Image: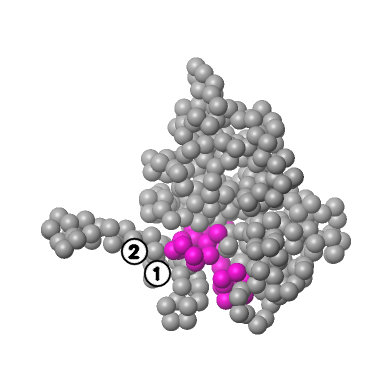
Amino acid sequence: MINTISLENFTLFHNVNADFCPGINVIIGENGTGKTQLLKAGYAACSTVEQIGASSLEVDTVRQKLTERFVSLFKPLDDKLGKLHRNGADSNSKITVKFSDDKELALSFFNNSQNLAITGIGNLDNTGAAPVYIPTKEVLSFMKGFTSLYQRFGLSFDQTYQDICLSLDLPEVKALKLQEKSRWAIDQINAVVGGQFIFYGGGKVTFKSENNEYSANVVAEGFRKAGMLARLLETGVIQPGISGTLFWDEPESNLNPKLMEMLVKILLELSRNGLQIIIATHDYVFLKWFDLLSNKDKGDQIRYHALYKDLKTKKIQLEHAENFKSLSVNAISDTFSDLTKAQVKLKMGGLGQ
């Protein structure tokens, strides 16, 4: 579990410290404020030895493999690590992750570095608590053959898409080992989408309803996205209290607003059972459901993180609050407020005049 991620001179960040709660963390901000970069930095730094493809904790091997992982996740210009160094900065880029067990992993590099410098390599040991990253786009519609193509050719997809395809294609855990809350969440999703996604291996995915079986490609994209979560629970890649942090970039993307209440209920229940979740979102409905459905009596912990560019310094800043209404800068609420004002003005006959 992550306590803090600190980014210094990394991509567009001058110096930002994100303090996460053990429950649900919701990151908001306008485009270009670094939400996805923050998620990927945390995901990359929390990778296990197995995920980066290292056979041991030998220092040079880990440095090389973790460097390759950062490049594959961020896709910098010319595939050069140094391109992730903040333009114009005269000191090293630094990524520091502090974990809940007081362990720390620190990574650094400069604009001409070939490999990361790493302190705390032992914290990458394969404990089974690997993090999970769900990217913005659903993958069920193009899984077949994707992993083979990704390994052979220079596809423009970043490595989060390969990672998620490999995770989805794992076999299901035994029914007796499937957690009760995982089974409940899977049943909730299958009931809403009207069937179940079937994984045959090799990336072949279909959708089976009560009376028929279809190609996954003909199913609504929002259903496919919900189906990804159900499958990750089926395979045990997501196991509350056991698996590592879940990073999810824009869960609401292509999701009908009517599905958001169900998704928020599931995420809250998973967090109550020990899963740390870090989400980036642009959606007011999604944000509001967290506000309405969270219950402190059930132990819910939700922290909101607002990324924004300071108008004076032009630097990216980060503000935390336990209630999103308490944030002084909130791009989602501000936009909703502007929309409400425009609607009132329209009714009064003043919009566009």
Q: Is residue 337 left or right of residue 119?
A: left
Q: Is residue 312 above or below residue 205?
A: below
Q: Residue at x 45, y 32 (%)?
A: 192
Q: Secondary structure at mark 1?
A: loop
In the drawing, what numbered circle is on residue 31?
none
Q: Is residue 218 above or below residue 75?
A: above
Residue 84 image-quadrant placement: bottom right
> What residue is pinned by disc 2?
334
Location of residue 252 in the rendering, given as x and y in whole percent from the top left corner? 46, 47
Give the image location of residue 60, x and y in percent.
Answer: 85, 64
Quarter of the image with the N terminus in it: bottom right
Q: Can residue 18 be found in the magenta stretch?
A: yes
Name the residue at 49% across, 51% down: 250
Q: Please, what secondary structure does the residue beneath circle 2 have?
A: helix
Q: Amino acid at mark 2?
A: Asp
Front-lying residue, 189 or 94: 94
Segment tinted magenta in the rendering: 7-36
Front-most of 236 and 199?
Answer: 199
Q: Quadrant of the C terminus?
A: bottom left
Q: Is residue 17 magenta?
A: yes
Outermost residue on the top side: it is: 211
Which image quadrant for residue 54?
A: bottom right
How far is disc 1 from disc 2 in space, using C-alphas? 8 Å
Tag 1–tag 2 contact (CB < 8 Å): yes
